[in-house]
Image: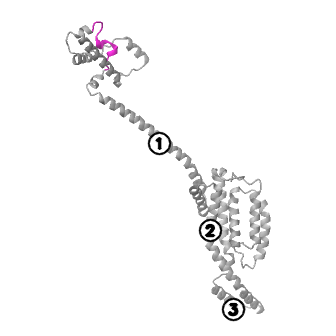
Amino acid sequence: MAYRRSITARAKLLYEQRQRITPSSSYIHRDDDERNTLSDAPITGNRNIGDHFQGRFFGTGNDFSTFNTSRNLFHDRRFALPVACGPILGRCMSSVSVGEGRVDKIEIMSDVAEVFVDNTAEVAVQAGPMVNEVALAAADSYFPVAALQYLTDYIHSISGFNWWASIVLTTLLIRSVTLPLMINQLKATSKFTLLRPQLEEIKEDMQNRGMSPSAVAEGQAQMQALFKEYGVTPFTPMKGLFIQGPIFVSFFLAITNMVEKVPSFKQGGAFWFTDLTTPDSMYIFPVFTALTFWITVECNAQEGLEGNPAANTIKNVSRVFAALTIPFTAGFSKGIFCYWITSNLFSLTYGLG
C-alpha cells in the first residue's frame, strides 16, 4: 500500500508539472474540430517517450503493472505529455519561472513604450501646429515683415500671453529699441530750430540781390557752413517720419498676414475682442485709435514735426486724417489695432515727456 501511495504521489506530481509547462509549438491545435477529435481518441503517438519516462521515474519492475489495472498511466490523457516535453522535463524547472518572468518584463516594457510613444505623439501634435502656422505665415513675407512675425511668435511662446498681449509687448519692444534714434532726432531738430533764423536771413539776402547766380552760390555756401557747424541737414526734421514710417508699414503687413494665416488668432484676444481676425463691430478700437492720434497731434507730440516749417500744414492735415480714421479703419481686424493704439500711446507719452 505504501508503494502504491508513492506511485500515486509521483503521478500527481508529474501531472502538476505538466500543467505548469508551456506546450511547444509542435503541440498547438489547429482548430476546434481537431481538438474534439483528439479529446476522444487515446494517445499512442508518444508511447516511446512515455515508456522512457516510465522507466526513468517509476522503474521497470512488474509492480507497476498493479497500478495500471485498467489503462496505462501514459495512455491516459490526463498524464499525456507533448512531444517536446521530454527535453523540457530534463531541465531545471526554474527556467520556466525565469521565462515567465521575462515574458512579464517584456510585456511591462512594451506597455511603458506604448505609453511613452502616445504621450510624445500627443505633445508633438499640440506643439507642432503653433510652430508650423507661424512659419507658414512668414514663409512668403519679406525679411522685415517675417522678422516681426517671428519676434511676435517668440514673445508669445516665452511669455505665455495671448496674441493681443504679445502684439502689445512686441510693439513696446520695437518702439523702445528705436527710442535712442528718436531722441537723437529730437536733439537734431532742436538744433535745426535754432539754425532756422539764420537760414531765413540768408534766403532774404539772396532775394534782395535778385537771386543772381553769384548771390545764390554765396548763399548756398553759407547754408552749408551752418549745417556743418550744427551737425544737421535739411532733412533732419523728417527723420522721425523716415524711422516710424517703415516700422508702421512692416507691422501692418506682418499682423495682417498673421490674421489671415494663423488660425489661433481667432482665440487670441480678450474681453469683447476675442477674435482678432474680425473687425470691431462696436467701433471701440477705431474710435480710440482716432482719439489717441488726435490728442498726439494737438499736443505737438508727432515725431518729425518739431522745428518743421510746414508743421502747421501737417498739423491741419493730421486733424483731418484723425477724423477720417474711424470710417477708414472700421473694416480693419482687431489685431491691427493692438499695434496701432499701443504705438499711438507710446508716441503720446514720448512727446509729452
Task: Give the Cα distance between marks 3 and 2.
Answer: 43 Å
Please say whether residue 78 is one of the residues in the magenta stretch: yes
Q: Sequence-wise, which precedes: disc 1 or disc 2?
A: 1
Task: Say which mark, if any, is on residue 83.
Answer: none
> How many numbered circles are shown?
3
Please say whether residue 42 is one of the residues in the magenta stretch: no
Task: Give the Cα distance between marks 1 and 2.
Answer: 45 Å
Q: Is residue 186 left or right of residue 86?
A: right
Which residue is label 3 attached to?
Answer: 218
> In this orientation, which residue lies closer to the viewer: 4 or 14?
4
Task: Give the Cα distance between marks 1 and 3.
Answer: 83 Å
Q: Eyeballing the image, is 217 above or below 276?
A: below
Q: Sequence-wise, which precedes: disc 1 or disc 3?
A: 1
- For the residue marked with disc 1, what is the amino acid? Phe
Which of the 4 image quadrants contains residue 217? bottom right
Find out whether the residues at labels 1 and 3 contact each other: C-beta distance under 8 Å. no
User: Which part of the image, by quadrant, shows the N terminus?
Assistant: top left
Please state the extent of the stretch shown in magenta in the rendering.
68-82
Find out whether the residues at labels 3 and 2 contact each other: C-beta distance under 8 Å. no
- Point 72% across, 87% down: residue: 199
- Point 75% across, 79% down: residue: 309
| Residue 61 in picture, x, y percent from top left | 19, 12
Which of the 4 image quadrants contains residue 245? bottom right
Task: Say which mark, if any, is on residue 116.
Answer: 1
Q: Is residue 188 left or right of residue 322?
A: left
